[in-house]
Amino acid sequence: MNSKGKDILTDELSAALREQLPKDVHKVISIIEEMGFNLILVGGAVRDFLRVGQLPHDLDFELRHEVKYTPQEWAVRVKSLGLKLSESSHFKVEYLNFSILRITFEKSLWEVELAPARLESFDDQRS
């Protein structure tokens, strides 16, 4: 498939995904992007969307920022993001370990979790 074909497929998938998101989730995404963060949808939502074309109501996003921060600076930025989200509307923001934010909505079953990128490593179990 040529690069133009890839762009068309990506655009169609993006549009189909966006159509399933409620207004509150769109607003959360907008606020996050205004603060310079980038989001990548990860986990079971990606699998479900690709398998059956439907998003579950719990979305996990990897949270990144345009600027590289120290762990301490990152924690401050994430706290600021959480405050902005909780002040801006009827979002309930929980601060979890490892700079993870969980956002729930007053009148909705949707839940959004924002986590920084992480590197997982496993000990080689072979003898």
Image: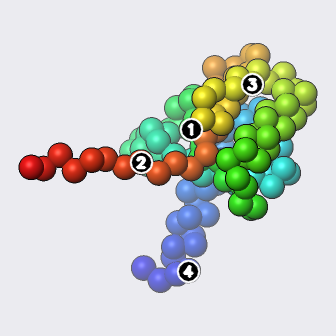
Is 25 left, or right, of 17 in this rendering? right
The answer to whether residue 29 of the structure is visible from this angle is: no
Dot 4 or dot 3: first in sequence order is 4
Instruction: Residue under label 2, please give it.
Output: 120
> Badge 2: how crowded within 10 Å, few (<14), some, or many (20+)?
few
Number of residues whose C-alpha sits closer than 10 Å to that of mark 4, classed few (under 14), some (14–19) or many (20 or more): few
Residue 113 horizontal/vertical position (percent): 62, 33
Q: Nearer the viewer, mark 1 or mark 2?
A: 2
Q: Position of residue 121 (x, y in %)?
A: 37, 49
Judged left or right of residue 97, residue 85 is right
The image quadrant of residue 31 is: top right
Q: Which residue is painted at 52% across and 32% down in the image?
A: 56
Q: Which residue is mark 3?
A: 93
Label 1 or label 3, whichever comes before in sequence order: 1
- Residue located at (56% from left, 64% from top): 10
SS at mark 3?
strand
Q: N-terminal of the two: label 1 or label 2?
A: 1
Reading the image, the residue beneath label 4 is: 4
Earlier in the chain: of badge 4 and badge 1, it is 4
Q: Quadrant of the N terminus?
A: bottom left
Residue at 84 percent across and 27 percent down: it is 86
Q: Which residue is mark 1?
A: 60
Distance from Cα at disc 1 to Cα at disc 2:
17 Å
Residue 72: image quadrant is: top right
Residue in view at x 41 percent, y 48 percent: 120
Q: CA distance from mark 4 to mark 1?
A: 29 Å
> Front-most of 78 and 35?
78
